[in-house]
Amino acid sequence: MSNNTQSKKESALIAENGPWAAVGEHPNAITNRFYTYERVQEIVAFIQNIVPAKPEVAIICGSGLGGLAELVVDKVVIPYADIPNFPRSTVAGHRSNLVFGILNGISVVCMQGRFHPYEGYTTAACAFPVRVMQMLGAHTLIVTCAAGGVNKSYRVGDIMLIKDHINFPSMAGNNPLIGHNDERFGKKIRPRFPPVGHAYDRQYASQMKQVAAKHNIELREGVYCALGGPCYETIAEINLLRVLGIDAVGMSIVHEVTLGAHCGLRMLGLALITNKCLFEYDSTIEAVHEDVIRISELKANELQQLILDFVGGIKTNKT
Ligand SMILES: O=P(O)(O)O[C@H]1O[C@H](CO)[C@@H](O)[C@H]1O
Ligand SMILES: Nc1nc2[nH]cnc2c(=O)[nH]1
């Protein structure tokens, strides 16, 4: 039996039995059972009925960064609430829309609002839209986020190109790929053990550096780490992260990039440093989400400029 036929059979069984049939399994295994290949296909078909054009680039907008989607022209907006089986964003600073259209000459889909594990979604549910966007036609994924600056030299408002990440939830056994490995996701056969050592595309990273230099925008480059949240970090945790060589901390991105790697997307990540993390016990400042959104919105223009130009470069490379 070919891998494909086996995947189809397993997926049909899973769809038939539903998530309740998986009681006792890892929670992400249950969610993988819910967002089967067929269910993702149904969502894709629903969207294609509304937007026949294929997006080439998928963009996930972080906290307070949804304004990027406003720059899209010839826009078609699909609220998550209208899409069967699509989750909703429940966090301030995240709208709940898929925005399709043209950004600097290239066909894009923007997630105006993402899902985080602390909202009660498993990492697999948080990340499954990546598969939807890939199946719609995207070959590139740009992830953006707000993050706390762990690196002592970082300033509020800095933009960090994500060189690599540390996926703490995954290291603790919470990876969105846990459960059935449906090899039909992605263009090629997708492995049980996908490599993520070069998840962030090196050519894209160097193109982004050139774009930043052109605009005279200082770009940091560093390692992002995701924790489960929703608490911000203790002082001891931040000091631990620093010892580990982490530059910025957040509660997103890593599960999205994991599914992106699994289905063969080229990826670029940008983190906006919205606050400096606490290092000292006599410090009186604490991170607050309202400040995170305020800083994101304040600095959104620069980030948008970088992405706009970068996306234009993808178009140029193609011609
Ligand atoms: O990563 P994004 O979605 O930008 O949001 C970041 O900001 C929120 C905390 O203020 C957390 O959700 C964290 O992950
Ligand atoms: N975990 C975490 N996420 C953030 N998102 C924005 N700032 C922060 C922060 O300081 N810590």
Image (spheres, rainbow, N blue to C red):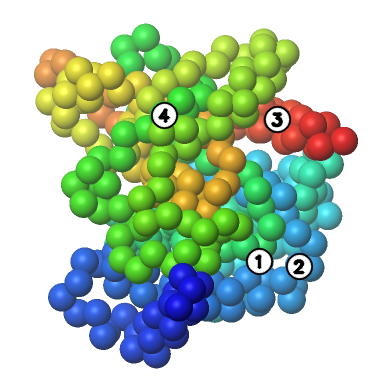
Q: Residue 242, how many percent across, how many down? A: 24, 19
Circle 2 sits on which residue? 51
* Residue type (three-letter) at the residue carrying disc 3: Phe
For the N terminus, the image quarter is: bottom left
Q: Are marks 2 and 1 in contact (CB under 8 Å)?
A: yes
For the C terminus, the image quarter is: top right
Residue 316 in the image: above or below residue 279:
below
> Who's the residue at 30% across and 60% down the image?
178
Q: Cα distance, mark 2 to mark 3?
A: 24 Å
Q: Are marks 2 and 3 in contact (CB under 8 Å)?
A: no
Single out the mark in the foreground, 2 or 1.
Answer: 2
**SS type, badge 1:** strand
Q: Cα distance, mark 1 to mark 4?
A: 32 Å
Q: Cα distance, mark 4 to mark 2?
A: 33 Å
Q: Disc number at residue 310?
A: 3
> Who's the residue at 47% across and 52% down the image?
262
* Residue type (three-letter) at the residue carrying disc 4: Asp
